[in-house]
Amino acid sequence: DCSIKTGTSRYLKKDLSKLFEAYYECKGINPAFSKKVDKIKIEFGALTGILISSFDIESNTANAVSEADYEPSINLTGGVFLTLVLPRNQGRFAIQNELLLTSYNIKGHHLQYASEDNYTETAITVKATHLKLNTLARMKIPIQQVNLRLEAGMSNAYALSISADQVKTRVFYAPAET
C-alpha cells in the first residue's frame, strides 16, 4: 500500500500530474501514457524585401505640390522577426513581431508653363526613414500540401528622419533664377 501526501493539492493539471506521478513511482510501474508539457516555440530570423512608395496628393487649390508628377521610390527594407509559436493545435497559432527599417526618397516635378520665356519649374524631394514595429497574430491553415497563413495585427512606426525640399526655378524673359 502507498502513502501519498497530497498536502495542498488543488484541482489543477500540474498538481494532478504530480499526484499521479507519485502514485506510479510508489507502485513501481510506468504509466501507459505520459504527455510532455507543450512549450512555446521561439523562432528568430531576418527579413528583407523591396519597398515601393509613391505620392498621390490632392488639394482644393492648384499648387505645385499637388499637381506635381511623382516618381515611385524603390528601396530595400530589412529587419528582424521574433515569433512565438503557441503550443497545442499543432503550432497553428503564433504571435509575430517584426522590427523593420524602411526608407523612401520620392521626387516630383512640376512645370507651370506660360511661354518659352515665362515658366516656373518646381522640383520636390521628400525623404524619410522609419523604424517600424509590426505585431501580428498568425493562424496557419493547412490545405493538403500547402499552408495558408492569415495574419492580423497592428503597425507602429517612429520617424528617424524626415525632410522635404522644394526648389523653384522661375524664368521670366531673362536667364533662369533659382
Image: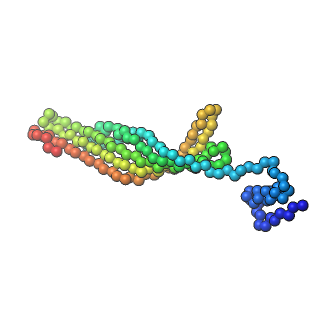
133 vs 81, nearest the viewer: 81
Residue at (71, 50) in percent of width and height: 36
Residue 9 percent location from the top left of the image: 77, 64
Picture residue at 63% right of the left edge, 37% below the top: 142
Q: Is residue 96 visible?
A: no
Query: Which residue is at the far bottom?
Result: 7
Which residue extends farthest top? 144
What's the residue at 13%, 41% (across, down)? 176
Give the residue furthest to the right: 1
Is 30 positioned to the left or the right of 66 in the image?
Answer: right
Q: Is residue 175 left or right of residue 110?
A: left
From the viewer's perspective, tell me whether residue 59 is left or right of residue 111: right
Confirm whether residue 157 shows in the render: yes
For residue 13, above or below residue 88: below
Q: Is residue 19 left or right of residue 121?
A: right
Say which of 157 and 76 sits in front. 76
Q: How many marks?
A: 0
Q: Position of residue 103 (x, y in %)?
A: 37, 46
Residue at figure coordinates x 81%, y 48% from the top left = 32
Decide which of 61, 85 is in the foreground and name it. 85
Residue that sits furthest to the front in the current view? 28
Residue 138 image point, x, y percent: 57, 45
- The image's colour scheme reads rainbow
